[in-house]
Image (spheres, rainbow, N blue to C red):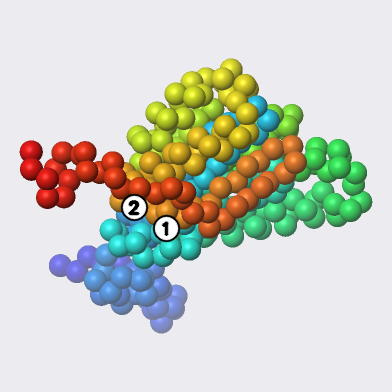
Amino acid sequence: MDHSPQAWGRPRDDIYGSYNPSYLPYNKGGYQAHANGQPNTHTQSPIVTGTSVIAIKFKSGVVIAADNLASYGSLARFTDVKRLKPFNKKAVVGFGGDVSDMQYLDRLLSSLDVQENYSNGASGDLDDETENRAMMSAKNLHTYLSKVMYKRRTDFNPLWNALLVAGLDEKSTPFLAFADLLGTTYSSPTLATGFGAHLAQPIMRRAVPDEEASQKLEREKAVELVKQCMKVLFYRDARSMNVYSMAVIDENGVDLKEDIKLEAESWAFAEGIKGYGTQTV
């Protein structure tokens, strides 16, 4: 028996027109995407991905870093992918996960930035204090991105990313928060995505166990901690590389440095690892 909608009892075609099959699959005479008649599907797993993003708060701002590698599975395919995206003078977004979804979010944020600039007027017409008050803070940006992620999750078409939003809130105090593909959000004085959550977080938490400690941390010490974490990640995470980007956000704006190379690399420590190389146990 033919259960196709075209075969159901309905008014005559010569009076009411022929049945519109546009929403049907190809094998039923329609125009839907899948020739095998399967329903439309969304990304079920990321393809080209970036690994860890790490960030730490200090007394007047936030330091955030991510390497420049995008991996195609286990292949180190693209070595110049910048995964830190400044939004304005108050916020930087760090992207882990799928690179194509990162590019989509980057275009979305560029559009939002244009809208914000139009709604706030030309910056030359405002004094610095008024401009800073009108500028979208990192906290507001994080709220916006978390809603975008949650909306896509409820559409069963998630953006396969883990995001860190670093910068200053509306009171110009340091702000750091996380959002993922499910719309899950939380904040902490130290945050990391990917393998960084296992390898870098212990190092950062040793120095900054709570908010009170972050308020005493100097900028130089925070930068050194992040550099140390990036070196550990290069040694221990097979999906990382020795070139990375780092941004410092404070009351002076965003100081973004790209293509930073790890210093004083040495694999001498590996000889003491059981099972490394040709050593016998």
User: Can you identify the residue that label 1 sits on?
Assistant: 69
- The percent position of residue 85, horizontal first and vertical second, equals 59, 52
| Residue nearest the observer in this picture, 17 or 147 | 147
Locate residue 219 relative to residue 94 in the image: left or right.
Answer: right
- The percent position of residue 250, horizontal first and vertical second, equals 69, 37
Say which mark, if any, is on residue 239. 2
Secondary structure beneath dot 1 equals loop
Quarter of image, res 31: bottom left
Report the residue at 14% width, 43% height from top: 275
Report the residue at 38% width, 44% height from top: 233
**In contact (CB < 8 Å): disc 1 and disc 2:** yes
Q: Is residue 21 visible?
A: no
Secondary structure beneath dot 2 equals loop
Locate residue 257 relative to residue 123 in the image: left or right.
Answer: left
Going by the numbered disc 1, the residue's amino acid type is Leu
| Residue nearest the observer in this picture, 145 or 49 | 49
Which of the marked residues, 1 or 2, is nearer the chain's N terminus?
1
Report the residue at 53% width, 57% height from top: 259
| Residue nearest the observer in this picture, 162 or 84 | 84
